[in-house]
Image: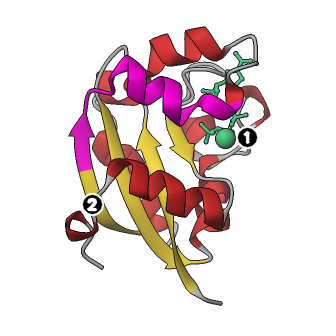
Amino acid sequence: MAVTRTFSIIKPDATRRNLTGAVTKMLEEAGLRVVASKRIKMSEDQAKKFYEVHSERPFYGELVDFMTSGPVVVQVLEGEDAVKRNRDVMGATNPADAEEGTIRKTYAESIEANSVHGSDSDENAANEIDFFFSKDEIVG
Ligand code: RTP
Ligand code: MG
């Protein structure tokens, strides 16, 4: 299996509850390595662009408000089959549907405040990494 990269966000509901370390520990225990990390406050512009694919969905406005409501930690994760590995440990979007032992089952508050984001394809991972990180911020 190839070593690849994915993009992760520890969302405002998790940073607010001081869960940055706990979430990162679950990512690391799932076989992912943090090769870049920074804590930022997303601007409204950034959040709108980042979630542009959801712009027609009814939850878009609320999602942008939520993602700009507090600090987030953006990370680049590296590991074997990183996109799938990360989504497996994240669990289902709605924590009510997430499996035991996943980050969302353990920590998410709701379908929106669901503690983590993870890219859903290698192509989106590359684009999302570029959106937040310069090459020299990533140390593999
Ligand atoms: P993500 O993109 O954050 O990794 O999560 P995902 O693929 O599991 O979920 P997606 O369908 O891409 O939705 C993006 C984020 O929008 C929020 N959401 N709210 N209120 C709602 O019905 C609703 N549905 C989705 C969640 O924060 C979700 O992670
Ligand atoms: Mg998604």
Residue 108 found in image quarter = top right
Asked if the stretch drawn in magenta spans residue 54, the answer is no
Label 1 sits on residue = 92
Residue closest to the far bottom: 1
Instruction: State the SS at label 1.
Output: loop
Quadrant in the picture for the N terminus = bottom right
Q: Which residue is painted at 61% across and 30% down in the image?
A: 52
Query: Is 61 rendered above or below residue 115?
Result: above
Instruction: Tell whether label 1 touches label 2 (CB within 8 Å).
Output: no
Query: Is 7 rendered above or below residue 51?
Result: below
Residue 26 visible within the image: no
State the CA–CA distance, disc 2 to disc 1. 30 Å
Query: Which range is magenta?
Result: 38-53
Residue 86 visible within the image: yes
Residue count near mark 2 (Cα–Cα under 10 Å), binned few <14, some 14–19, many ≥20: few
Q: Nearer the viewer, residue 49 or 99?
A: 49
The percent coordinates of residue 38 (x first, y second) are 23, 47
Is ligand 1 within 8 Å of the beta carbon of the residue shown at mark 1? yes
Label 2 sits on residue = 134
Amino acid type of the residue tagged 1 in the rendering: Ala
The percent coordinates of residue 26 (x first, y second) are 45, 55
Horizontal arrangement in the rendering, residue 28 relative to residue 97 (left or right): left
